[in-house]
Image (cartoon, rainbow, N blue to C red):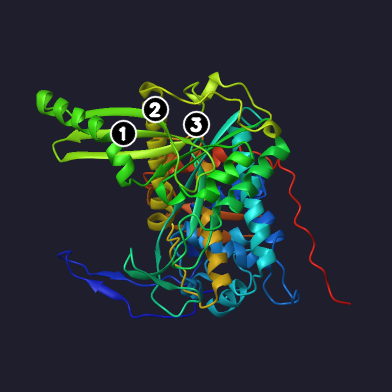
């Protein structure tokens, strides 16, 4: 129950009577829109499975792990990314309900308790949470494709800067970004928009550091479900490095990575660029020309296919390159028969024509859509609120924010929802659903939530409540290994 008091605030804009604003100390909340989301959570068993990955060395403490996890999880969804907010929210009746308590129950965990909770994590816990994130991604893919994994999956790899402003472990100064930062790696899938993996890294990490191992972690989980699955990987020039080529080619993965220009490539494509410039001068319309050829760097064991794009428009000419092992049958989808992963890619025909190169390049630039994941994670759900001192606690925060994003993304991916919610970013969901004031009444038989009759978004609320009844059940085998206990 809220105990703090405040002086009432008076306004005098009405001519004959003052308007007085004061706090109400009854059971009132501003976040009643979390309730249908909690119902979806229960059907998917989402936060409970996250809590099962955690380990408490002091299980007799006053607040359970799942309760504290839900405080942080639903706080992130509602826009309370800072633990300090929970010193007041610990008495909020809606937050008590979504964490499993009755409105008249004891207060939830305070900020210091939640901070200790975040610092409980170990590397083993982080690994389990990452594997759960992959498992829920597989469930989303199955739900999206009629109950089984599709024949072909694309993954987009991105590194994103996360500025830091304190004494966090492994925050380092990055010369390119000109700031102290972390550099997380994010791997997402474009049809479900699920973030399969988010991995926190030190501030000066190479863009592709650890990306080979992280990618194979996902690949192994997918192939355990469907051994013949075809996987394509896309990434910018930061991922066009030898170890990424090697891991893809050794494990039967198709890839398209950006490739940095050099003097030799410029010489090979000068004629193409001049042709694009001439075409633009003649038509005054943007000119895009392509070439496709075999190219071998000094440290490559063999030649690889490079696609060159020469472009000229009102802002001048430019050229871009990608390196790929996609076969000449383009596009990859629908034409390419599943290739057993143990046979490798050596027998597939290489691309050879400019038209094929254009198809591959246009597919590659679709990875730019994954920037929307970054926007929603960083600006919508404040993924960059990594202000703990310990690196592992910040890693845990990153996974909490990623899990909140994936959860919201799963809820809104439903054709029965209004279009505003289907395409709405987190701020839209807060404005049109989550942030609704309610009176909470607890009786001996039930808990009643009273919303304002004049609230304009009631149809949205009903639609999301109905969406909860269509929540999919967990389908992917996932059981965190039990922690050893000392005798």
Q: Is residue 307 above or below residue 128?
A: above
Q: Within the image, what quadrant is residue 128 found in?
A: bottom right
Is the residue under label 3 in contact with that under label 1 (CB below 8 Å)?
no
Q: On the rendered structure, is 110 left or right of 173?
A: right
Q: Which residue is mark 2?
A: 357
Q: Within the image, what quadrant is residue 140 found in?
A: top right
Judge by depth and name the residue closer to the eye, 433 or 246.
246
Q: Which mark is residue 416?
A: 3
Q: On the rendered structure, is 82 left or right of 345?
A: left
SS class of the residue under badge 3? loop
* Relative image position of residue 24 (x, y in whole percent): 43, 70
SS class of the residue under badge 2? helix
Is the residue under label 2 in contact with that under label 1 (CB below 8 Å)?
yes
* Relative image position of residue 227 (x, y in whole percent): 71, 33
The residue depicted at 18 percent of the width and 64 percent of the height is: 14
Q: Earlier in the sequence, mark 1 or mark 2?
A: 1
The residue depicted at 61 percent of the width and 28 percent of the height is: 151
The residue depicted at 66 percent of the width and 46 percent of the height is: 135
Crowding around mark 2 (Cα neighbors within 10 Å: few <14, some 14 to 19, many 20+) is: many
Q: Which residue is mark 1?
A: 309
Crowding around mark 1 (Cα neighbors within 10 Å: few <14, some 14 to 19, many 20+) is: many
Q: Earlier in the sequence, mark 1 or mark 3?
A: 1
- Total marks shown come to 3
């Amino acid at each position: 129950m809220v105990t703090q008091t405040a002086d009432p605030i008076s306004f005098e804009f009405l001519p004959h009577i003052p308007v007085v604003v004061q706090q109400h100390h009854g059971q009132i909340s501003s976040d009643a829109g979390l309730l249908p989301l909690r119902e979806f959570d229960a059907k998917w068993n989402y936060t409970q499975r996250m809590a099962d990955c955690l380990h408490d060395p002091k299980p007799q403490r006053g607040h359970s792990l799942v309760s504290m996890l839900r405080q942080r999880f639903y706080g992130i969804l509602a826009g309370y990314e800072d633990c300090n907010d929970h010193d007041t929210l610990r008495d909020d009746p809606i937050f008590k309900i979504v964490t499993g308590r009755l409105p008249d129950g004891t207060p939830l965990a305070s900020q210091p308790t939640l901070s200790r909770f975040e610092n409980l994590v170990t590397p083993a816990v982080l690994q389990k949470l990452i594997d759960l994130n992959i498992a829920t991604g597989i469930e989303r893919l199955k739900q999206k494709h009629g109950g089984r994994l599709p024949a072909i999956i694309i993954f987009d790899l991105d590194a994103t800067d996360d500025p830091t402003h304190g004494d966090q472990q492994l925050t380092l100064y990055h010369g390119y970004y000109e700031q102290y930062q972390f550099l997380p790696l994010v791997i997402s899938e474009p049809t479900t928009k699920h973030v399969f993996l988010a991995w926190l890294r030190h501030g000066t990490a190479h863009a592709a550091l650890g990306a080979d191992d992280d990618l194979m972690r996902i690949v192994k989980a997918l192939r355990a479900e469907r051994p013949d699955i075809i996987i394509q990987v896309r990434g910018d020039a930061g991922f066009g490095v030898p170890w990424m080529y090697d891991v893809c080619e050794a494990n039967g993965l198709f890839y398209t990575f950006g490739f940095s220009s050099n003097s030799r490539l410029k010489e090979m494509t000068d004629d193409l660029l001049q042709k694009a410039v001439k075409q633009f001068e003649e038509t005054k319309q943007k000119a895009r020309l392509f070439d496709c050829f075999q190219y071998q760097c000094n440290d490559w064991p063999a030649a690889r296919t490079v696609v060159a794009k020469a472009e000229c428009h009102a802002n001048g000419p430019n050229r871009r390159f990608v390196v790929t092992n996609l076969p000449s049958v383009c596009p990859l989808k629908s034409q390419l028969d599943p290739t057993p992963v143990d046979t490798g890619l050596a027998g597939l025909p290489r691309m050879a024509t400019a038209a094929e190169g254009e198809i591959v390049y246009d597919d590659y630039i679709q990875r730019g859509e994954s920037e929307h994941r970054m926007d929603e994670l960083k600006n919508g759900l404040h993924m960059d609120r990594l202000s703990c001192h310990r690196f592992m606690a910040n890693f845990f925060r990153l996974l909490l924010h990623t899990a909140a994003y994936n959860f919201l993304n799963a809820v809104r991916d439903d054709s029965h929802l209004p279009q505003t919610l289907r395409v709405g970013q987190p701020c839209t969901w807060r404005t049109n659903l989550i942030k609704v004031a309610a009176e909470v009444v607890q009786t001996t038989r039930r808990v009643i939530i009273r919303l304002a009759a004049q609230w304009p978004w009631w149809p949205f609320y009903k639609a999301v409540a109905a969406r909860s009844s269509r929540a999919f059940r967990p389908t992917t085998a996932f059981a965190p290994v039990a922690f050893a206990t000392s005798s």
